[in-house]
Image: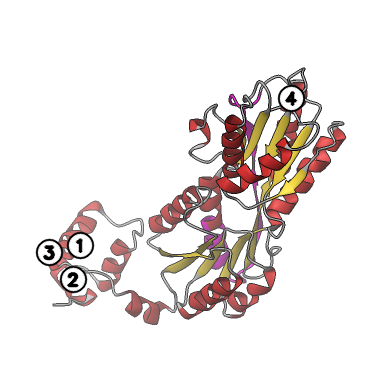
Amino acid sequence: MAYTMKEVARLAGVSPATVSRVLNKTPYISAATKQRVLQVVKDLNYFKNVHARRLSTGQSDLLGLVISEIANPYFPEIIHGFQAAAWDRNLDVLLCNTEYSPLRTESIIRKLVQSDVRGVAIMTASIDRSMTPELIEAGIGLVSCSICPADKLVSNISIDYQRGIFQAIEHVAALGHRSAAVIAGPETNRTAANIRQALVGGLKKKGMNPFPVTSTDYRVDAGASAVRTILSTPEIPTVIFCGSDLIAMGAMNTLEEAGVRIPEDVSIVGIDDIAFAFLARPPLTTIRVPRERLGTTAFEALDRMLKLKRRKGASYYVQTELIVRKSTGPARQHKLRP
């Protein structure tokens, strides 16, 4: 039997409004009242009717979270941060994976509009800005990482990669490195392009004109393939900067297979500080992106914007920092011929 909120209220000896406040974790409810309501809820096996709430309040309890792919270890901490913050406010999350497909992305945007989500956090740089107006026109709040500038119904989160990259270049320069290579992420990815530009520009300022500079996918096997190209050059660099930890791990595996020692022969620097980075052998020096904080910030940006009468968005910043481990060491003094 499906019970109504009025029946829960009657059995608990409170008003339906009090039942609603208890279920929505509203403060200023006495412990005794809260316990009495929750006991009736348990006894009746009562659950809130989400659709009824939507009709009565005009607001959805659902938020959308868009990522590239669940298999990429970059995203779980973002998901956890966003989802935990949403659940603390009694909101649900619809998780969507683009799989880097424009057609799939278009379908996801339509699905989010049809699902009447309250807001959407787009945590992937693989989505084109042209795909976002449909959300905004439907009155759905949007927060993204450097896709759209802050505006009505739009908030923007910028990740300060420059800070971590500067620290990483200073670190290897202090170790005596004078030759470097760069394996950046996909050319079509805005974040990857910005990281590549920052790495190349920063290395040139230090007198380390990077060569070769290549782009590849965010996959272990792609990093492995890119390193084979580097190993075929006449002058193998003493340090390789990678556009992600996955690329770095693929590079490290191939270097090991080629008999190249890390860091004695070649140092490696990654980006992201995924959970597996410190488990690599040797543990990976990397630029940390605080991804759980990124997820929490995305939720807070949506929550604040949607509470404003004018729904005006804002700009947010998340800093990166270098985490030094054992994949970087003093530059070798001999010519390398693997």
Residue identified by numbered label 2: 8
Horizontal and vertical percent position of residue 101? 58, 68
* Mark toward the start of the polypeptide (3 vs 1): 1
State yes or no: discs 4 and 2 in contact (Cβ < 8 Å).
Answer: no
81 lies left or right of 221 = left
Q: Please give the label number shown on residue 43.
A: 3
Q: For residue 165, which quarter of the picture?
A: top right
Residue 149, compared with residue 196, is above or below; it is below
Amino acid at pointer 2: Val
* Mark toward the start of the polypeptide (4 vs 2): 2
State which mark lies toward you, 3 or 1: 3
Residue placed most toward the observer, 100 or 138: 100
State yes or no: discs 4 and 1 in contact (Cβ < 8 Å).
Answer: no
Amino acid at pointer 1: Val
Inspect the magenta stretch and tell me whether residue 55 lies in it: no
Q: For residue 172, which quarter of the picture?
A: top right
State which mark lies toward you, 3 or 4: 4
CA neighbours of label 2 inside 10 A, class few (<14), some (14 to 19), many (20+): many
Q: Residue at x 21, y 68 (%)?
A: 14
171 lies left or right of 11 = right
Horizontal and vertical percent position of residue 21? 32, 64
Residue placed most toward the observer, 110 or 105: 105
